[in-house]
Amino acid sequence: MENRWQIAISAGLLAAVWAGVADALHLVTWIGFLSCSTFFAQTHSGIKGMLMAMTTNMSGVFWGWLIISGSSFFVSPLVGYTFTGIATAAMCLQASYQKLAFIPGAFIGCCITFAMGGDVAAILPPLLLGAVLGYSMSLLTGQLINLTQKMQGNVGAEVEES
């Protein structure tokens, strides 16, 4: 990995900023980090990657909420198991739609929803901001790489002039 330092500086700096912002706004920090990870795990970059992370994670939140809510109307845990199977199949099938093509993003959103007991109001803000965090890390890393290359070019030019 050629640009390890630039990535490390960008990720470290913005992770610290995110932790502070999440704390100040009383957001669940780890949800933002999972959404940020979704941004980097899927194949798209830029705005398209950010939107892919957001839409797939949010679709998973929907499926998780549906499982939790639907299961709560029935006494038998078998109904919950059935809802889980149907939602799992749906999360895989929805990947036929290009904007929801990253299946792990849906599973991450669904797992977050289970971990948070279906509290969608607490999930969505850090989930959306986490995708923005990933995009921001990508942008900052690109800027640091450009800056490094310019600095190395100037150093090389100074050596040649000597």
Image: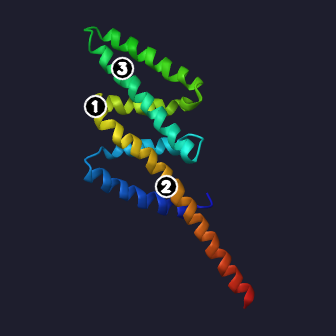
Q: Is residue 76 above or below residue 61?
A: above
According to the picture, the residue beneath numbered tag 3 turns out to be: 66
Q: Amino acid at mark 3?
A: Leu
Rounded to the nearest angstrom, the CA distance separating label 1 from label 3 is 12 Å
Is residue 29 shown left or right of residue 102?
left
Q: Earlier in the sequence, mark 3 or mark 2?
A: 3
- Tally of marks: 3
Q: Is residue 41 above or below residue 5?
A: above
Rounded to the nearest angstrom, the CA distance separating label 2 from label 1 is 27 Å
Name the quarter where the N terminus is drawn. Answer: bottom right
Q: Earlier in the sequence, mark 2 or mark 1?
A: 1
Q: Amino acid at mark 1?
A: Asp
Name the quarter where the C terminus is drawn. Answer: bottom right
Is residue 84 shown left or right of residue 98?
left
Q: Is residue 111 above or below residue 92?
A: below
Disc 2 to disc 1: CB gap under 8 Å = no
Snapshot quadrant of residue 14: bottom left
The circle drawn on residue 153 is none
Which of the pair 162/51 is nearer the observer? 51
Is disc 1 placed on a helix, strand or loop? loop
Q: Position of residue 93 (x, y in %)?
A: 55, 20
Q: Position of residue 131 (x, y in %)?
A: 45, 44
The circle drawn on residue 119 is 1
Snapshot quadrant of residue 27: top left
Rounded to the nearest angstrom, the CA distance separating label 3 from label 2 is 32 Å
Q: Position of residue 145 (x, y in %)?
A: 59, 64
The circle drawn on residue 137 is 2
Q: Earlier in the sequence, mark 1 or mark 3?
A: 3
Q: Residue at x 40, y 41 (%)?
A: 128
Around disc 3, counting alpha carbons within 10 Å, would you say few (fewer than 14), some (14 to 19), or many (20 or more)?
Answer: some
